[in-house]
């Protein structure tokens, strides 16, 4: 017998159960699961949903960093290549993503950034800092790496369900900072009413169009491997995971940061258009 469940997953009962519990089983199968929950709890009224969202983003981070290292998944050399990376999680809330990443990966540092401080036993998490600061939506010379008392030169930026226009500012600051090389974004509140994709509009809801607009912005900003995929294992209908990379040469990296103040961000009827961003990528 087939039926739709409240998560919008269609399939027989066993398939629905498997999809809805896969990330939860994955998380609680980790030896660090208890330590992670002790550090971030309480994590809200829907802990299962929050865990699946964090797992989806962390697994996407893992894929990006392993692919960049050019190593097979699970090899020691591949994980050694993560040591030079830092992670910045924006609109972090309970910091589940950076805390989980700090436990799983040998990152140089993990940062949680949110405008509201959370009192948790953060001191128990190694190579981690909770940075209380609002995402600066007004300054165009603001850089994410410059706002952190940072230690490295390579960053992956993550954000889970930044509300509405905050997702736009996450993308804008990611593009403007030459040290930020990868992005993993799960957008939240649909802001797609002003974005039209012609005949596709009949098939797309506001959330879909909003995700596509953010992808357009990343592609126009010179990013490569821009992807948007629904993750059916996430216990939320807002389950699109956007990934993008900036594989810039050292020279262009410096030029991108220098030209950040001159970016021309224009919200058109169909998409965001970024001007002044070098489109060249390293060979």
Image (spheres, rainbow, N blue to C red):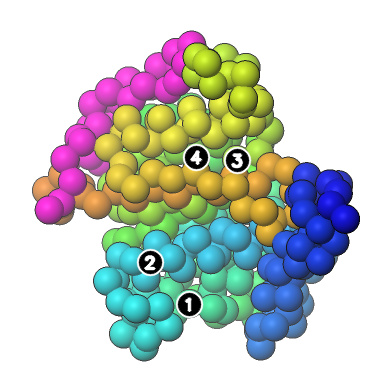
Of the pair 133 and 243, the residue shown nearer to us: 243
User: Is the C-beta separation of discs 2 and 4 under 8 Å?
Assistant: no
Q: Residue at x 76, y 50 (%)?
A: 9
Is residue 24 rendered to the left or right of residue 185? right
- The first of marks 4 and 1 along the sequence is 1
Residue 90 percent location from the top left of the image: 55, 49
> Against 184, is 237 above or below?
above
Which label sits in the foreground, 2 or 4? 2
Q: CA distance from mark 3 to mark 4?
A: 10 Å
Q: Which residue is mark 1?
A: 105
User: Is residue 191 visible to us here?
Assistant: no
User: Is the C-beta separation of discs 1 and 2 under 8 Å?
Assistant: yes
Q: Which residue is mark 2?
A: 65
Q: Which numbered tag is attached to residue 187?
A: 3
Residue 211 percent location from the top left of the image: 54, 34
> Against 121, is 67 above or below?
above
């Amino acid at each position: 017998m087939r039926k739709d469940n409240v998560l919008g997953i269609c399939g027989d009962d066993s398939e629905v159960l498997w999809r809805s519990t896969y990330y939860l089983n994955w998380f609680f199968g980790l030896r660090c699961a208890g330590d992670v929950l002790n550090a971030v709890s309480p994590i809200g009224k829907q802990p299962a949903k929050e865990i699946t969202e964090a797992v989806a983003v962390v697994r996407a981070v893992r894929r990006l960093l392993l692919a960049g290292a050019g190593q097979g998944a699970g090899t020691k050399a591949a994980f050694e290549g993560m040591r030079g990376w830092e992670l910045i999680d924006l609109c972090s809330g309970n910091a589940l993503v950076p805390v989980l990443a700090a436990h799983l990966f040998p990152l140089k540092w993990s940062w949680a950034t949110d405008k509201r401080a959370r009192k948790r036993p953060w001191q128990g998490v190694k190579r981690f800092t909770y940075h209380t600061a609002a995402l600066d939506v007004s300054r165009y010379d603001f850089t994410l790496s410059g706002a952190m008392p940072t230690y490295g030169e390579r960053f992956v930026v993550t954000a889970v369900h930044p509300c509405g226009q905050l997702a736009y500012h996450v993308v804008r600051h990611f593009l403007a900072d030459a040290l930020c090389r990868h992005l993993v974004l799960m957008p939240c509140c649909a802001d797609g009413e002003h974005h039209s994709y012609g005949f596709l509009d009949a098939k797309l809801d506001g959330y879909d169009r909003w995700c596509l607009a953010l992808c357009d912005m990343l592609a126009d900003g010179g990013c490569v491997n821009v992807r948007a995929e629904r993750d059916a294992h996430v216990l939320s209908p807002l389950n699109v995971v956007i990934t993008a990379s900036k594989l810039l040469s050292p020279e262009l990296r410096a030029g991108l940061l220098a030209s950040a103040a001159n970016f021309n961000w224009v919200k058109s009827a169909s998409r965001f258009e970024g001007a002044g961003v070098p489109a060249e990528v390293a060979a």
